[in-house]
Amino acid sequence: MVMDNVLFTDKLAKNCSVVAGVYSDGSLSSSAQKIDENFGGIISRNLKKLNFVGKTLFKTCSFVADHGDYNHFILAGLGESDKKFTKFELEKLGAAIYSGVSKLDTDVVVAVEDVDLRASCDCVPAFIGFGALLKSWNFEKYKSKKDESIKLKNLSLLTADAKIAEEYFAKLRKIADGIFLTRLVVSEPANVIYPESLAAMAKNELSPLGVEVEILETAEMKKLGMNALLAVAQGSENKPRLAVLRWNGGKKSESPVAFVGKGVTFDSGGISLKPGDNMHEMRYDMAGSGTVLGLLKAVALNKLPVNVIGLMAMAENMPSGSAQRPGDVVKSMSGQTIETLNTDAEGRMILADALWYAQDRFNPAAIIDLATLTGAIVVALGHEFAGLFSNCDELADQIVKSSVATGEKVWRMPMSEHFDEGINSDVADMQNIGKPNVRGSSITAAQFLKRFVNDKKWAHIDIAGVETSVNDLFICSKGATGFGVHLLYDFLCENYVK
Ligand code: BES
Ligand code: MN
Ligand code: ZN
């Protein structure tokens, strides 16, 4: 399911395959050059023969050694020799190398070391290894026949200081474990992952790591007045849960950062039923909660010295005799009333109570919610960017910065009164969809959420287009991406870890 090991070494073992870095001008990386000299110029000779141009940053191509102890030499294009690599570019390089060698049944050593000299991040081999590791994950749990073409178990990176790289990589490995948990729960079908089972999974995964896990059930939610969340859940046999995850890594006096995830384990639309085509994709509608879960795992594994709250707001949105009806009015935990005009706009109702609860109980320094909230954000930003909304420029800038660093792209979207007015209802304080003359429904949805954060610093990330991919991406195969874990981990490190 995932490659066994990423190793760091300063020696070349015999009978392994070697990945040699090549620049766009045809020159070899210095470590590859040394190997070339020791093997009678085998790399440079083949380089000419194949007319390989190392221009395309992540292209690999391979040839078999005609003599010597090595099975294979694989060329990896490194682009211009003076261009600086970002962390994410190093990850992409690692992922491309993994794809190029994963079918080999030898050990593989990567010789691209002098990339070190022109990288803008602290540990180059570790990030290359991280990219390879992320790419190696796949979900084939339900396949009776596993893919046997993938042979690679260990990938070794040639580096002068293996110890430093190992130490650095150990941290990245734990972030990867968080990402893998997110990918796993997002990939699982809705008959396996429903509020009760996802809550149990959160407890099993996180309690042993020192995270306090509290699970609220229907009765407690009723007591707290979470009628918006309950309204969404009332049509389903699967009862809702609110998982409250607490990582107390910081000082007692420091207010926590709260992450709130939409966890609709299946979104049929409810009585406002969705069309049948692609309805199965709505098993991914818990990705926000999945991201919060993976993030808390990464934070706890690396014992980040910061206080973090994770809220997983989980329900299943189904049509039935007990389901909420279009036109129903409920009073949310905040006291504000909501007219449900469309039962398919359920995410914001769940988040309304979860956000209010987050600010009310924990007085957080900042709240960030993640939600597969609107189809419209996919129309606006495609599958390339998540939509970022915020009531605080500073917070938004911090998130954008981490987005650039990690390659998990977000694009800030506007908020304004026009859209806010669009959700004023004739019969209640607000309605859960915008009026027909107000378009831009991703913004309307964000305006709705804003009414439940009580002016706390808040950001909302609409991940509807990025939580899964129908195509293979650089650092993951098609399916669940784990988007947001690395982004928000980086955000915490940059802004809250002292
Ligand atoms: N979960 C969906 C949004 C979604 C759509 C996620 C496509 C991923 C892919 C959400 O609950 C929803 O149904 N939103 C509606 C809102 C509308 C009724 C205002 C939508 O986007 O159509
Ligand atoms: Mn919906
Ligand atoms: Zn939904």
Image (cartoon, rainbow, N blue to C red):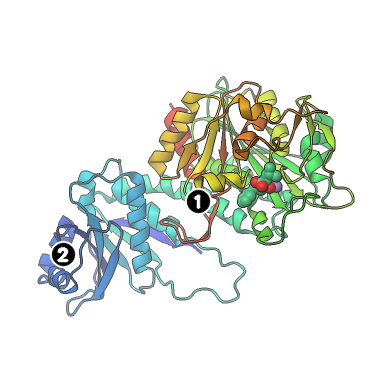
**Secondary-structure class at tag 1:** loop
Front-most of residues 32 and 461: 461
Residue drawn at 14 percent across, 58 percent down = 25
Is residue 1 left or right of 280 when viewed as pictured?
A: left
Q: Residues within 10 Å of mark 2 (few under 14, many from 20)?
A: some
Q: Quadrant of residue 213?
A: top right
- The quarter of the picture where the C terminus appears is top left
Provide residue 67's location: percent of width, then percent of height: 17, 79
Residue under numbered circle 1: 383
Q: How many numbered dots are placed on residues in this image? A: 2
**Secondary-structure class at tag 2:** helix
Residue drawn at 51 percent across, 30 percent down = 306
Front-most of residues 344 and 69: 344
Residue drawn at 50 percent across, 51 percent down = 383
- Of discs 1 and 2, which sits in the foreground? 1
Residue drawn at 71 percent across, 31 percent down = 423
Look at the image and tell me whether residue 146 can be seen.
yes
Label drawn at residue 35: 2
Provide residue 22's location: percent of width, then percent of height: 20, 60
